Image: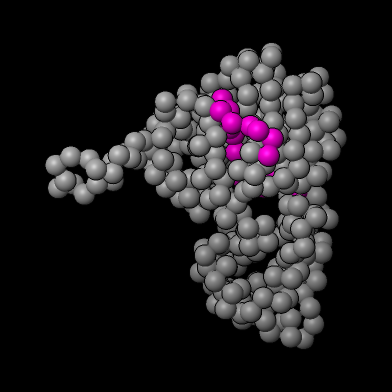
Amino acid sequence: MEYTHRPVLLRECLEGLAIRPEGTYLDGTLGRAGHAREIAARLTTGRLFCIDRDQAALDAAQERLAGHLDKVTLIHGNFGDLAQLLDSRGLTGLDGMLFDLGVSSPQLDDRSRGFSYRLDAPLDMRMDRSEALTAHTVVNQWPQEELRRILWQYGEERYAPQIAAAIVRSRAVRPIETTLELVEVIKGAMPAQALREKQHPAKRSFQAIRIAVNDELGAVDRMLQAAVPRLAPGGRLCVISFHSLEDRLVKNALAEWARGCTCPPDFPVCVCGKKPAVKLVPRKPILPTEEEIAENPRARSAKLRVAEKLP
């Protein structure tokens, strides 16, 4: 299939990274290599390190980054392990890092991966197929209360108690094996008016289970703590999020890095000595244009936040 994918907020990311041809950069979520290809194309003596937890993405990058591979290093790993992945390679003082937190289109579109609530497949949802935990285990073995918690917390699903109870009842008869079997259980637990809503009734539940399987929020939190200390002064951190849970983590972490003195307001002088580590550029998130949303509906919920490391 011809590679025609347009990465989300591409122009805005390139501007946010402020790429220098001799700089050292990181694409922490390689995916379809759309961002990586454009970053690499702007390097001369610089280098781009690309991380992805999905080996299929790294394999495909051999073709998608053709012509630039002399400037690129591919790393199989989880960006949640960013500190270890960079430190073990002696990588410090990077000039820019980009993280696109969305699930890559090939994962959604590949029936066998089990991410889609529209395509029938075994319950899997692993971004890294070498990991042990699958959606099948979550759905068929996790306690009802834990299922309710993740559906509510990660999917913001208002019918979480009913859906969790329905899953437990169904699996007591026989295991839930496929995505469409799970969709039917979810739909059966929801009232008629919820089934008539524009959004697919299983969307929130599938998001929740996917996040749990891949520890997505934990990985984002660990990445945000590791990235800023490993930037060079003036280096840029760009993070694209697609739902409120991720964006809240990014917003709060960057605000904390940008925060200076933490002394109580009534202290006459600062005694904590805390200095801001970054400045936000700009302070508010960057959103896709109407033109981009028209071309790529998956960009609709994207938010880009950019921070620059202070000296």
- What residue is drawn where x is 72% and y is 42%? 52
- What residue is drawn where x is 70% and y is 72%? 139
> Could you say which is closer to the camera, residue 96 or residue 36?
96
Q: Is residue 87 visible?
A: yes
> Could you say which is closer to the camera, residue 65 or residue 151?
65
- Residue 66, picture quadrant: top right
Assign the N terminus to one quadrant of the image. Answer: top right
Instruction: Provide the residue span drawn in magenta.
Output: 88-107
Q: Position of residue 205 (x, y in %)?
A: 62, 65
> Could you say which is closer to the camera, residue 166 or residue 70?
70
Q: Is residue 251 above or below residue 305?
A: below
Q: Position of residue 237 (x, y in %)?
A: 52, 33
- What residue is drawn where x is 68% and y is 39%? 88
Q: Is residue 97 magenta?
A: yes
Q: Is residue 295 visible?
A: no
- Residue 67, picture quadrant: top right
- Residue 134, picture quadrant: bottom right
Q: How many marks?
A: 0
Q: Is residue 202 above or below residue 270?
A: below
Q: Position of residue 21 (x, y in %)?
A: 63, 14
Assign the C terminus to one quadrant of the image. Answer: top left
Q: Is residue 181 above or below residue 92?
A: below
Q: Is residue 103 magenta?
A: yes
Horizontal relation, residue 65 to residue 230: left or right: right
Q: Position of residue 49 (x, y in %)?
A: 69, 31
Here the colouring is one colour
